[in-house]
Image (tube, rainbow, N blue to C red):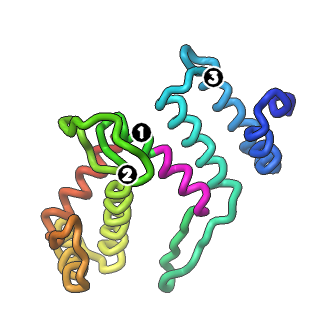
Amino acid sequence: MDLIYQCSLERRVIGVFVAHSADFNHLLSELDAIAKRSGGRELTRDNVVLSLQIIARLLNGALPVDISEIEPGVWLSVNHSVAEHIRMLADAISDLDFGLTSPLLKPSSTSKSTAKRPADLREKDRVLCEALLIFKQRHRIATLKEAARRLSRELTKNGYRRRGQQLTGLSLLRIYNNYYNSMR
């Protein structure tokens, strides 16, 4: 706990707030590891994003999570809004290096040649991928392709649009493949 007294007021407040967490010492060691690496004390996007991701992860574990049963045997867990805001801010800052803009931030460049999906669209894609897996399991569908076709039909019937266009089974399968390939 000696490190808390060497920190800024903000870090001390966070330290007091989450000191009860078993992961607090691990958080301090991760934050100190960032500072000790070459260029770690400089204010750079990479350092800020790493720091925010570590803090969001810790807060997510320390703050209450909303868990509810959406149907028998299917549970939904929603992160605390503060932890989610910090995580989304880290994503938005990270997106600037690709020329993408979050509504919170101004663009770092006008070049879109290396652009990827913005953070809010990646989050929607993640939810679609999880929904696809749940739908496949719940309806006991043998192939992912068939599940994507049937789920996209249900979503379209209920008025869902992605970037203003109807979602097809093939496009949902591409979203799924792109999402999981980007995580490798």
Left or right relative to 119: residue 72: right
Residue ID at (53%, 29%): 47
Residue under label 1, please give it: 94
State which quarter of the image contains the N terminus: top right
Predominant SS of the magenta segment: helix
**Residue 122 appears left or right of 34:** left
| In contact (CB < 8 Å): disc 1 and disc 3 | no
Q: Which image quadrant for residue 160?
A: bottom left
Q: Do tag 2 and tag 1 residues touch (Cβ < 8 Å)?
A: yes
- Residue at numbered disc 2: 119
Q: What residue type is labelled 1?
A: Ser
The crowd level at tag 2 (other Cα within 10 Å; few <14, some 14-19, many 20+) is: many
Q: Report the span colored magenta.
A: 80-90
Kindly identify which residue carries mark 3. Answer: 35
Q: Is residue 14 magenta?
A: no
Q: Which of 103 and 98 is in front in this view?
A: 103
Give the mark nearest the N terminus, 2 or 1.
1
Query: What amino acid is found at the position of numbered circle 3 in the picture?
Result: Ala
